[in-house]
């Protein structure tokens, strides 16, 4: 066999094996190229498709390497001030979680006044209520982020159900000779009992 033929066979086998692999559990978007993230972060994670697109509809969540204090304040006030805050807010508005690997913290500065430190912590808490998670050494923020990625958004409108009472059922029988229920109509327990007693169902 020639070298080119061996390479083709290896390529075919590789493609066949890739098709047999189970699909990724998560599809997470990145705000920057992978070089801007710690390599250990990717090494510890498996079954994740890393996407560099910023379309919230095609991803389960967004991973951001760093957020400054000014960006945190802008997100807390829902103000898109730059490219990164715009991406983060687009995911949050779509109901998708955002994981921040490193954020400026007020706890690092011992010279900061109490009320200023309190305000910074309130901004972080507000962002957490919006759906942002902050990566911690114990991975608690990351675990909560992945759990949030698994949540599926509720349907915008639940199908409305109309219930037919026993009295309405009797009126329908008097007007027509049968029971024609639509997909949205359900019989109340008394109406169902009446229908079974009178053998209206075949």
Image: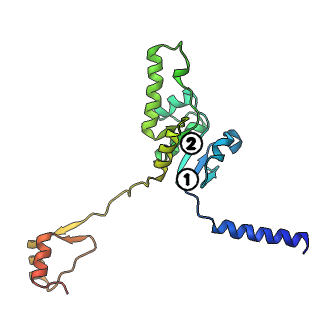
Q: Residue at x 64, y 69 (%)?
A: 20
The tag on residue 176 is none
Q: Earlier in the sequence, mark 1 or mark 2?
A: 1
Q: What colour scheme has been applied to the protein in the rendered image?
A: rainbow
User: Residue 164 at what x, y percent from top left?
Assistant: 16, 70
Q: Quadrant of the N terminus?
A: bottom right
Which image quarter: residue 87? top right
**As drawn, is 33 to the left or to the right of 105?**
right
Secondary structure under badge 2? helix
> Depth-wise, is mark 1 or mark 2 nearer the camera?
1
Within-10-Å neighbours for mark 2: few <14, some 14–19, many 20+: some
Q: Where 127 sits versus 160, above or below?
A: above
Residue at disc 1, secondary structure: loop
Q: Which residue is mark 1?
A: 59
Residue behind mark 2:
87
In screen coordinates, is 191 left or right of 98?
Answer: left
Farthest residue in the right direction? Answer: 2
Q: Are marks 1 and 2 in contact (CB under 8 Å)?
A: no
Rendered view: 45 above or below 192: above
At 50% from the left and 48% from the top, the residue drawn is 146
Confirm whether residue 165 shows in the render. Answer: no
The quadrant where residue 71 appears: top right
Does residue 188 sit above or below 76 in this rendering?
below
**34 w.r.t. 104: above or below:** below
85 to the left or right of 94:
right
Q: What percent of the width, then of the height, locates residue 53?
A: 62, 50
Distance CA(mark 1)–CA(mark 2): 12 Å
* Placement of the C terminus among the 4 image quadrants: bottom left
Q: Nearer the viewer, residue 110 or 181?
A: 110
């Amino acid at each position: 066999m020639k070298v080119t033929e061996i390479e083709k066979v290896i390529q075919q086998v590789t493609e066949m094996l890739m098709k047999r692999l189970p699909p990724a559990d998560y599809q997470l978007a990145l705000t920057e190229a992978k070089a801007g993230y710690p390599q250990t972060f990717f090494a510890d994670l498996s079954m994740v498709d890393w996407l560099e697109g910023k379309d919230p509809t095609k991803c389960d969540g967004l991973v951001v390497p760093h957020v400054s204090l000014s960006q945190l304040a802008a997100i807390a006030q829902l103000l898109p001030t730059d490219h990164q805050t715009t991406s983060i807010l687009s995911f949050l508005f779509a109901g998708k979680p955002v994981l921040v690997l490193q954020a400026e913290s007020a706890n690092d500065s011992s010279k900061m006044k109490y009320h200023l430190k309190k305000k910074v912590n309130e901004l972080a808490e507000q962002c957490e209520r919006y759906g942002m998670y902050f990566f911690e050494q114990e991975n608690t923020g990351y675990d909560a982020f992945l759990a949030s990625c698994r949540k599926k958004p509720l349907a915008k409108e639940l199908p409305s159900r109309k219930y037919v009472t026993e009295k309405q059922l009797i009126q329908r029988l008097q007007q027509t000779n049968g029971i024609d229920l639509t997909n949205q109509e359900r019989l109340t327990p008394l109406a169902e009992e009446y229908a079974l007693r009178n053998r209206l169902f075949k």
